[in-house]
Image: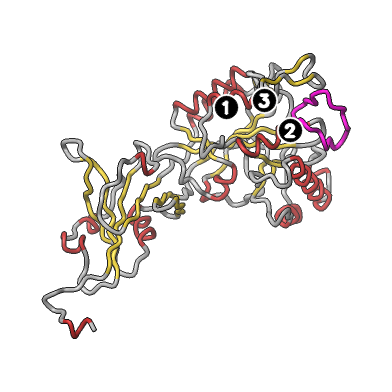
């Protein structure tokens, strides 16, 4: 539990139950165990009159900025940290080449490292919005994604060579290549609400995911390929999609309006492949990064609309760690760190030495009467989270002072 101000704990049990003639009231009770390891509610903290309970608790915990996310009667109160760094790792394809490739074994090793060293995989949008409410208390957020939709990112087994060979299926379901990025993530990465927080940024300078399943190659911009539609819909349901532009041209080699049109055309094509709208798509990654993001370029990208939606941000390729969400100054120029076989020797040292953001959050069960939850796990809490029961109580009347005439 985080320290709270002593004055908040020095309240009589009378005030923990209610205040005379108060219209409404609220008390936070800490869900903990007694010395016999039995669950109890302790350390009542009364919310002062006129204060919003979550704003009060955030202030008590010393959160400079914060966000709440509700799931029914459960509220996740989390800090938007402005101190520290968040690694946003960029991959390209799996293979044994040095530049822009990483072997499948190394990719799996990195996922294992993240799992056992208190890193928590969040989505690119969660980082941009500062929403760390799903990150267990004390864990470190990390963002991961892959550019290009190239070889080894999402591959099925084929009869014959990979590009044109027929996809092997069992009961109509395509068989994943076990050494592809998607297969490794599905086996080793954790899911959040059925989705793995890993973004596939798609460009159309070549066949996306480099497989055609005997279909003819239509050429640029590679629209209307049935297998690509199947893969994009799968990723939209199980992972996250992003834009990497249509032509994969360096942004600063175009004027801002031309590049924005290139991005929008890629967005339209991804939506088309997704069956009308790619629901997970919210961000862009610049091909080859971007040296200078001009105000004109930023304005054009921020103003793009598709199905009533706008992009929430864009990612560079500058080999740096990103700032804490609360210190993010430009959501359309976010740093990413390259991981490939050339740089493999430094990735673990970089993560170990990073001034990583450490998430802080509280799990709060909001009820009208004081009672114990079934368990902390029923509230979605991990072992490291503090759990509170927020009790709202109605106006109380002092029977020694009130008479029937006064209550009329």
Label pair 2/1, CB-CB below 8 angstroms: no
Query: Where's residue 149, x and y in %?
Result: 72, 31
Which residue in the protein does label 1 denote? Answer: 186
Answer above or below: position of 384 versus 331: above
**Residue 296 counted in the magenta span:** no
Determine the CA span between mark 2 and mark 1.
Answer: 20 Å
Question: Going by the image, does 26 lie left or right of 87?
Answer: left
Instruction: From the image, state whether disc 3 or disc 2 is nearer to you.
Output: 3
Residues at discs 3 and 2 in contact (Cβ within 8 Å):
no
> Quick one: label 1 or label 3, which is nearer the N terminus?
3
Residue 164, given in percent of the width and then of the height, sits at 82, 21
| Residue, disc 3 | 173
Q: Which of marks 2 and 1 is in front?
A: 1
SS at mark 3 in the image: strand
What's the magenta region?
Answer: 209-228
- Badge 3: residue crowd in 10 Å (few <14, some 14–19, many ≥20): few
Residue at image coords 46%, 46%:
133
């Amino acid at each position: 539990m985080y320290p709270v101000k002593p004055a908040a704990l020095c309240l009589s049990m009378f005030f923990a139950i209610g205040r005379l003639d108060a219209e409404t009231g609220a008390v936070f009770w800490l869900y903990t165990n007694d010395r016999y390891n039995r669950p109890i509610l302790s350390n009542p903290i009364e919310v002062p009159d006129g204060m919003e309970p979550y704003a009060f608790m955030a202030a008590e915990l010393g959160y400079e900025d914060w966000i709440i996310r509700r799931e029914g009667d459960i509220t996740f109160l989390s800090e938007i940290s402005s101190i520290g760094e968040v690694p946003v790792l960029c991959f390209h394809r799996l293979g044994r080449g040095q530049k822009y490739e990483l072997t499948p074994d190394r990719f799996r090793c990195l996922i294992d490292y993240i799992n056992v060293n208190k890193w928590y995989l969040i989505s690119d949008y969660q980082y941009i919005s500062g929403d760390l409410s799903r990150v267990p208390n004390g864990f470190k957020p990390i963002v991961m994604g892959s550019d290009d939709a190239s070889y080894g990112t999402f591959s099925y087994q084929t009869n014959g060579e990979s590009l044109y060979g027929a996809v092997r299926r069992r009961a109509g379901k395509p068989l994943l290549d076990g050494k592809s990025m998607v297969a490794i993530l599905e086996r080793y990465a954790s899911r959040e609400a059925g989705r793995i927080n890993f973004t596939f940024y798609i460009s159309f300078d070549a066949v996306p995911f480099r497989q055609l399943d005997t279909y003819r190659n239509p050429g640029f911009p590679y629209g209307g390929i049935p297998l690509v539609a199947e893969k994009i819909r799968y990723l939209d349901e199980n992972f996250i999609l992003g834009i990497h532009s249509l032509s994969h041209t360096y942004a600063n080699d175009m004027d801002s309006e031309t590049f924005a049109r290139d991005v929008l055309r890629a967005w339209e094509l991804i939506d088309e492949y997704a069956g009308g709208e790619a629901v997970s798509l919210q961000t862009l990654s610049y091909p080859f990064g971007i040296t200078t993001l001009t105000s004109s370029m930023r304005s054009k990208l921020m103003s793009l609309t598709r199905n009533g939606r706008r992009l929430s941000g864009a990612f560079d390729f500058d080999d740096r760690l990103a700032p804490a969400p609360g210190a993010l100054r430009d959501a359309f120029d976010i740093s990413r760190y390259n991981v490939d076989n050339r740089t493999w020797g430094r990735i673990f040292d970089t993560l170990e030495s990073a001034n990583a953001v450490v998430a802080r959050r509280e799990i709060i069960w909001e009820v009208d009467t004081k009672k114990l939850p079934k368990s902390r796990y029923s509230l979605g809490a991990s072992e490291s989270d503090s759990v509170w029961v927020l009790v709202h109580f109605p106006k109380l009347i002092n029977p020694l002072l009130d008479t029937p005439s006064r209550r009329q």
